[in-house]
Image (spheres, rainbow, N blue to C red):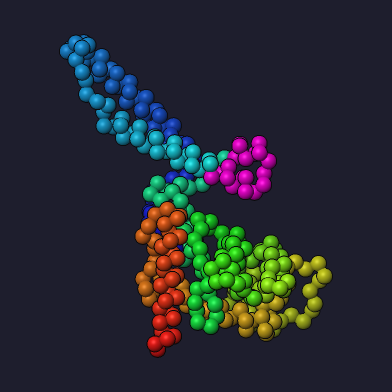
Amino acid sequence: MKANASKHKAMSYGRMKERERQLRAEVRELLAQAEAADAAEDAHYGVDRRGDELPAELQRRETRLKKIREAKRALEERARQSAEQAGKPRAEVQQAKPADKEQYNFTDPESRLMKGSDGLVQGYNAQAAVEPRLQLIVGQSVTPAANDKEQLEPMVQVIEQQSGQRPASILADSGYCSEKNLAYLAATGQSGHPIEAYIATGKQQHDEYRQPCPREPLPRNATRVERMKRKLQTKAGRAVYAARKTIVEPVFGQIKEARGFRHFLLRGLAKVQGEWALVCLTHNILKLHRLCYA
């Protein structure tokens, strides 16, 4: 979902380092010019006369240099936090540096550059879990992480927190598929039962899951992803996963198309999370209203 920020107001860490060097050189040159002008004015008018304030060009560059340095520090702190979350040794955490392509947006620093349906967008990753009968949203969150693979476990916890129970089964697209996530679902559930998973293992080709399921058995050392792919090739697996088109996809269509919510109006992760929660609450109220008064 698009943030209230332009992707053209972002700068990469590598570009920051380059621009910082350029601005320092320009500031030194402007200071030298100012000192030369001051000396000339002192010689002409006397040393006790007050000159003008710093030239506007110098002020503009120093302000820009300050913002770039703050952005660099923010990216460096982000890199250290990522290293710490990855469980790296303390020495590596302290020395962690962002990649040169890592982006920082000056309008909304907590938003990220993400791949959307119409190309790269400056935005947030809005998550929603939908129950199958009434299309009610039973779990929602917003994250600045572009990769959905890290969102499945948090979303299961969000569903339990916001709806009061863990799901018995989950349908999800290939963005959530990984060995780690499938292992988590197999070990998580109510009363010791695993969560039944139907997660696409890759981008579906045309008619891929309409082909007959292969008859040969899977090897004993088959990975969880390979087993999931076979599961979705079965007649039952195809039927269950096909229901996803009538459960969650219409909800995002209703929010974006019917209600026109295509980008956030607020800035900052905390405010965006509140805005998305309000959007999801409104969706549920409208669904319940139609159910009661249709």
- Residue 255 visible in the picture: no
Q: State the residue lying farthest toward the right.
A: 220
For the N terminus, which image quadrant? bottom left
In the rendered image, residue 8, in percent from the top left (x then y), is placed at: 39, 51
* In the displayed structure image, the side of residue 37 where residue 3 appears, left or right: right
168 or 253: nearer the viewer = 168
* In the displayed structure image, the side of residue 164 where residue 122 appears, left or right: left
Q: Residue at x 53, y 41 (%)?
A: 77
Q: Quadrant of residue 226?
A: bottom right
* In the displayed structure image, the side of residue 41 where residue 1 appears, left or right: right
For the C terminus, which image quadrant? bottom left
Q: Residue at x 71, y 73 (%)?
A: 191
Q: State the residue lying farthest toward the bottom.
A: 294
* In the displayed structure image, the side of residue 131 where residue 237 appears, left or right: right
Q: Is the residue 267 above or below the residue 27 in the image?
A: below
In the rendered image, residue 25, in percent from the top left (x then y), is placed at: 39, 28
Counting every numbered tag in the picture gives 0
Q: State the residue lying farthest toward the left.
A: 45
Q: Is the residue 82 above or below the residue 68 in the image?
A: below
- Residue 192 visible in the picture: yes
Q: Is residue 91 magenta?
A: yes
Q: Quadrant of residue 28?
A: top left
Instruction: Please provide the residue range marked out in magenta.
Output: 78-96
Q: Is residue 290 magenta?
A: no
Prevalent SS, magenta region: helix
Q: Is the residue 39 above or below the residue 103 in the image?
A: above
Q: Residue at x 53, y 83 (%)?
A: 133
Q: Quadrant of residue 254?
A: bottom left
In the rendered image, residue 108, in percent from the top left (x then y), is placed at: 41, 51
